[in-house]
Image: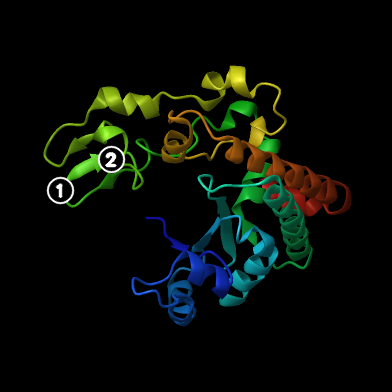
């Protein structure tokens, strides 16, 4: 069973994004308890959501998460926010700083597993078809709600498309025809027309079906914001790859294993 912690970064960001029900800050409680979690599960991933308001402190947030004891982290963009060109420029600068931190920690033998960079490097050196699906929804994961209804993942539910993605119910058989929507989907075959020519296509795979549906109306069509961020990440993956290849080839070989 996997485990990750939703924590969006420095206290100012965490408290703005994830306050308690009454509005009080959540970061003090997290700081007290996260070390207990990491004592049992050192490899727990810190999952941070990036918004236009927090994009300017990406590297600072990574350092903060590191100070709490996290060695693995991932930064996911909130695609349904209103991102401006200025916000994208800020994010691009911060991702460059984050890439620098990633390389520095590798060289210092204190690696941070920043998921976007590690997976991007692996995808860069893998066959294009190494990743078939954008995520495990309906295949490797499901969500069972309090009524016993089964959904492709925790983000699906009755609120999305009138509940048409319900896969079944405890005690009943699966809707195998609907499950094939996820099981047989091939992100590269289906996206060939729209994605061919995109330099970031080889590392692009982790978009969210639900976010796609909310932004574009189709679970298979990512938003422009998502595509912009994948290109930003791709730029830094190339930069990291070149740096490691020509200066620290042994580190790159270790990562690719």
Q: Where 111 sits versus 162, above or below?
A: below
The residue beneath circle 2 is 151
* CA neighbours of label 2 inside 10 A, class few (<14), some (14 to 19), many (20+): many
Q: Position of residue 174 (x, y in %)?
A: 21, 31
For label 2, the SS is: strand
Say which of 11 and 252 sits in front.
11
Q: Where 11 sits versus 84, above or below?
A: below
Q: Where is residue 34 in the image (x, y as percent from the top left)?
A: 46, 75
Q: Choose top left, top right, bottom left or bottom right for residue 171.
A: top left
Say which of 109 and 146 sits in front.
146
Query: What residue is rendered at 47% in x and 40% in y?
Result: 208
Query: What residue is rendered at 61% in x and 47% in y?
Result: 83
> In whole angstroms, how far apart are the C-alphas of marks 2 and 1?
11 Å
Q: Where 34 sits versus 8, above or below?
A: below
Query: What residue is rendered at 63% in x and 24% in y?
Result: 195
Q: Position of residue 107 (x, y in %)?
A: 79, 63
Residue 124: assigned label? none
Say which of 47 and 54 sits in front.
54
The residue beneath circle 1 is 147
For label 1, the SS is: loop
């Amino acid at each position: 069973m996997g485990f990750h912690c939703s924590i969006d970064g420095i206290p100012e960001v965490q408290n703005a994004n994830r306050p308690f029900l009454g509005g009080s800050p959540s970061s003090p409680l997290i700081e007290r308890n996260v070390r207990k979690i990491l004592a049992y599960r050192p490899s727990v991933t810190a999952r941070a959501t990036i918004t236009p308001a927090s994009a300017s402190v990406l590297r600072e947030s990574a350092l903060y998460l590191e100070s709490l004891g996290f060695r693995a982290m991932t930064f996911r963009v909130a695609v349904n926010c209103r991102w401006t060109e200025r916000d994208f420029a800020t994010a691009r600068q911060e991702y460059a700083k984050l890439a620098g931190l990633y390389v520095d920690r590798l060289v210092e033998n204190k690696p941070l597993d920043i998921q976007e960079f590690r997976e991007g490097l692996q995808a860069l050196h893998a066959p294009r078809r190494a990743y078939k699906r954008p995520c495990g929804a309906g295949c490797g994961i499901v969500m069972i709600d309090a009524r016993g209804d089964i959904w492709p993942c925790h983000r699906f539910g009755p609120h999305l498309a009138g509940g048409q993605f319900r896969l079944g119910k405890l005690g009943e058989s699966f809707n195998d025809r609907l499950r094939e929507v996820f099981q047989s989907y091939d992100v590269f075959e289906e996206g060939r027309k729209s994605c061919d020519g995109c330099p970031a296509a080889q590392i692009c795979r982790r978009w969210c079906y639900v976010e796609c549906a909310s932004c574009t109306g189709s679970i298979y069509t990512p938003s422009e914001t998502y595509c912009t961020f994948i290109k930003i990440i791709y730029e830094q993956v190339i930069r990291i790859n070149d740096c490691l290849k020509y200066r620290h080839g042994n580190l790159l070989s270790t990562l690719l294993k």
